[in-house]
Image: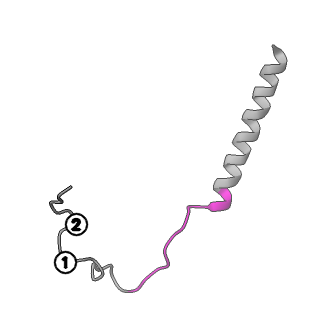
Amino acid sequence: MEFIGVLLFIILIITAAASISAVLRDGRGHLPPDRSEPWTARDLPNNSCWTLRAF
């Protein structure tokens, strides 16, 4: 029984270390580059996104 407890503890430590390593390696994730112009919706379609559809 003690063997299973020690094995689970080791697996827990390895999992925590791998998670911390992945977070530190990735940082805060992908950040878009800084842009000087403000965000605009020029590429969005003019019509409504959901319309009645006949199935």
The three-letter code of the residue at mark 1 reads Asn
Q: Quadrant of the N terminus?
A: top right
Q: Which mark is residue 46?
A: 1
Please give the name of the residue rendered at 83% of the width and 16% of the height, measured from the top-left corner.
2
- Magenta portion: prevailing SS class: loop
Labels in figure, total? 2
| Residue, disc 2 | 49
First to last magenta residue range? 24-36
How has the structure been colored for display? one colour
- On screen, 47 above or below 23? below
Membership of 7 in magenta stretch: no
Q: Where is residue 35 in the image (x, y as percent from the top left)?
A: 43, 83
The three-letter code of the residue at mark 2 reads Cys
Please give the name of the residue rendered at 67% of the width and 54% of the height, measured from the top-left corner.
22
Membership of 35 in magenta stretch: yes
Please give the name of the residue rendered at 49% of the width and 74% of the height, measured from the top-left corner.
32
- Near-viewer residue (31 or 3): 3
Residue ranking furthest to the left: 52
Query: In this rendering, would 14 be left or right of 42?
Result: right
Q: Position of residue 21 (x, y in %)?
A: 71, 52
Q: Quadrant of residue 6 in the image?
A: top right
Query: In this rendering, would 38 be left or right of 2?
Result: left
Q: Position of residue 20 (x, y in %)?
A: 68, 49
- On screen, 5 above or below 36? above
| CA distance separating discs 2 and 1 | 9 Å
Q: What element carries label 1?
A: loop
Residue ranking furthest to the right: 3
Q: Residue 32 carries which label?
A: none
